Image (cartoon, grey):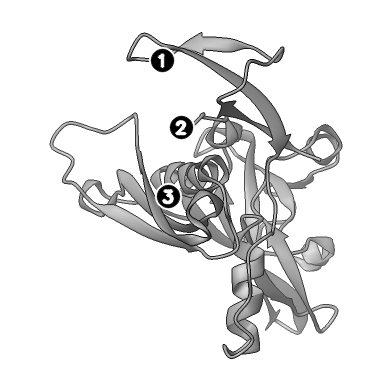
Amino acid sequence: TDTLSYVTDSVTTSGSFIAPDGTTKYYTSALRYRCDGVLDTQKPIVENIDAICSSGNGTLTYDNKTGLFKVLVNRPMDIDEEANAFLFNADNIVSAITVSTTDLYSLYNFSEITFANYLQEDGSDTIFVNAQDTLPNEPTSGISITLPMTRTRYRAGDIGNVQLQQSRLGTVVTFTGDHSTMTVDVGDFVKVSDELKGWDQKIFRVMRITEQERAGSVTCKFTLREYDSTVFDEVMYY
């Protein structure tokens, strides 16, 4: 149900803005994600599944608890999830918290997105998205994204922008939780409080969980990625 604004050649009641070239542009809205491309049935099944998932900014992951695969959608957290997010703190973390960040020379500052443009009879098209918060002396480095099941420029640009901005956050944490943390699943939004790091219910998203035995009891090793809602702010591409 998430929507995205995009520029149209028609006059609309949704709104308008002045483009850099001085012309007036009108915009309207549509579903943020849509899978409407053409699959090549000669390709491996897993490759086609990945293509379908990519159109919704998602990835296919395996759930160790259920023994089933599921789609993990890259999306903003909703109000209920924030209110009910599991809290990690000194009461249930039984190891040191390891923090890793992306160094200056590993940062991506643009994304190159290839998609099937419906305006070109589903021919391959490319859009470039640049980061707006580059650092001094930051070397030029890009990430390539292929979206074979995405057919519009504004959707391709939005997915490329989200993935680019998230790659620049770069903060990944790992730690081990006690048995009470086994209710947490991959894809959950969680809160972490740690006095030494100055975190007071800082929001992360769970990327990986590994169950392990520790002194005769079951514990869980978690890998979390920093969450920032601003990476999902829409940018109109035309």
Q: Nearer the viewer, mark 3 or mark 1?
A: 1
> Which three-letter amino acid code belongs to the residue tagged 1?
Ala
The reply to whether dot 3 and dot 1 touch (C-beta < 8 Å) is no
Q: Provide the secondary structure element on which disc 2 rests.
A: loop
Which residue shows up at 70% across the image and 15% down it?
A: 14
Which residue shows up at 50% across the image and 44% down it?
A: 153
Q: Quadrant of residue 39?
A: bottom right
Q: Position of residue 31 (x, y in %)?
A: 73, 40
The reply to whether dot 2 and dot 1 touch (C-beta < 8 Å) is yes
Q: Earlier in the sequence, mark 3 or mark 1?
A: 1
> Which three-letter amino acid code belongs to the residue tagged 3?
Ser
The residue that mark 2 highlights is 238
- Residue 167 is tagged as 3
Which residue shows up at 27% across the image and 33% down it?
A: 134
Q: Is residue 226 left or right of residue 176?
A: left
Q: Provide the secondary structure element on which disc 1 rests.
A: loop
Q: Earlier in the sequence, mark 3 or mark 2?
A: 3
The residue that mark 1 highlights is 19
Q: Provide the secondary structure element on which disc 3 rests.
A: helix
Observer able to see residue 173: yes
- Compare residues 154 and 230 and report the one nearer the observer: 154
On screen, 168 above or below 181?
above
On screen, 66 above or below 81?
below
- Alpha-carbon distance for marks 2 and 1? 10 Å
> Which three-letter amino acid code belongs to the residue tagged 2?
Tyr
The N terminus - image quarter:
top right
